[in-house]
Image (cartoon, helix red, strand yellow):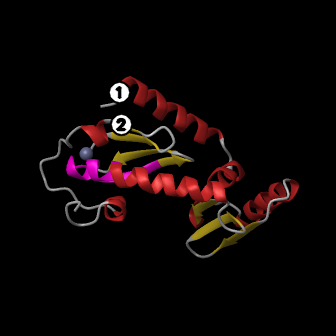
């Protein structure tokens, strides 16, 4: 079990760091940024601003919008560094998410940045933190039972990293 005070501090730090970023900063950090179309006031201006900043940094981006979403992503796919980050992330989620499911939570992603992720339970206040680089998994979501009595619903995150049955 990981020190809950340390986990709480890590969650706060991650949330603050992600909060400070604008969309272009998120794009650089994550490789893509997506909004519901209703949340973007002026789609053309939003796309133009992303492209302007990307041009200044000599980074190729694609932007677009449809009736549901506005999006931007870095063109050219994953760098080698990004690809190994993605592998580390998948590996730690395959170990962390089943803990939340077995604890009867309904895990969903809340914030992700690089090697760090915070997940929450959809039906209680439990948070969980995982750090793929430092190999840390902690927080109520992964360590304590969900207080709800009813059987949990399987979430998308649960399906992605755990599946419908027990781990073989
Ligand atoms: Zn729960």
Residue depicted at x 20% and y 56%: 152
Check residue 149 for magenta coloring: no
Visible residue check, residue 125: no
Q: Over which residues does the magenta segment extend?
A: 96-110
**Percent coordinates x, y for residue 72 in the rendering:** 68, 64
Circles 2 and 1 in contact, beta carbons < 8 Å: yes
**In this picture, residue 161 sits left or right of residue 65:** left
**In this picture, residue 62 sits left or right of residue 124:** right
Residue depicted at x 73% and y 60%: 46
Is 29 or 64 nearer to us in this picture?
Answer: 29
- The N terminus: image quadrant: top left
Residue that carries the numbered disc 1 in the rendered image: 4
Spatial CA distance of label 2 from label 1 is: 7 Å
**Percent coordinates x, y for residue 104 in the rendering:** 20, 50
**In this picture, residue 15 sits left or right of residue 47:** left
**Percent coordinates x, y for residue 29 in the rendering:** 65, 50
Residue that carries the numbered disc 2 in the rendered image: 138
**Percent coordinates x, y for residue 78 in the rendering:** 65, 63
Number of the label disc, if any, that sits on residue 144? none
Say which element carries label 2.
strand
Q: Is residue 1 above or below residue 101?
A: above
Residue depicted at x 49% and y 52%: 88
Residue depicted at x 58% and y 76%: 67
Visible residue check, residue 60: yes
């Amino acid at each position: 079990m990981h020190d809950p005070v340390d986990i709480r501090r890590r969650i706060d730090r991650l949330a603050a760091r992600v909060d400070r970023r604008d969309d272009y900063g998120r794009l650089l950090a994550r490789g893509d940024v997506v909004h519901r179309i209703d949340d973007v006031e002026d789609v053309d201006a939003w796309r133009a601003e992303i492209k302007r900043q990307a041009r200044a940094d000599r980074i190729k981006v694609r932007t677009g919008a449809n009736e549901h979403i506005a999006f931007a992503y870095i063109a050219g796919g994953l760098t080698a560094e990004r690809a190994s980050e993605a592998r580390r992330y998948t590996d730690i989620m395959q170990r962390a998410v089943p803990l939340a499911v077995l604890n009867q939570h309904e895990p969903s992603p809340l914030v992700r940045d690089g090697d760090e992720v915070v997940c929450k339970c959809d039906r209680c206040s439990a948070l969980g933190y995982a750090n793929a680089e430092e190999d840390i998994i902690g927080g109520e979501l992964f360590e304590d039972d969900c207080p709800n009595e009813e059987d949990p619903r399987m979430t998308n995150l649960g399906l992605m990293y755990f599946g419908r049955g027990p781990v073989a």
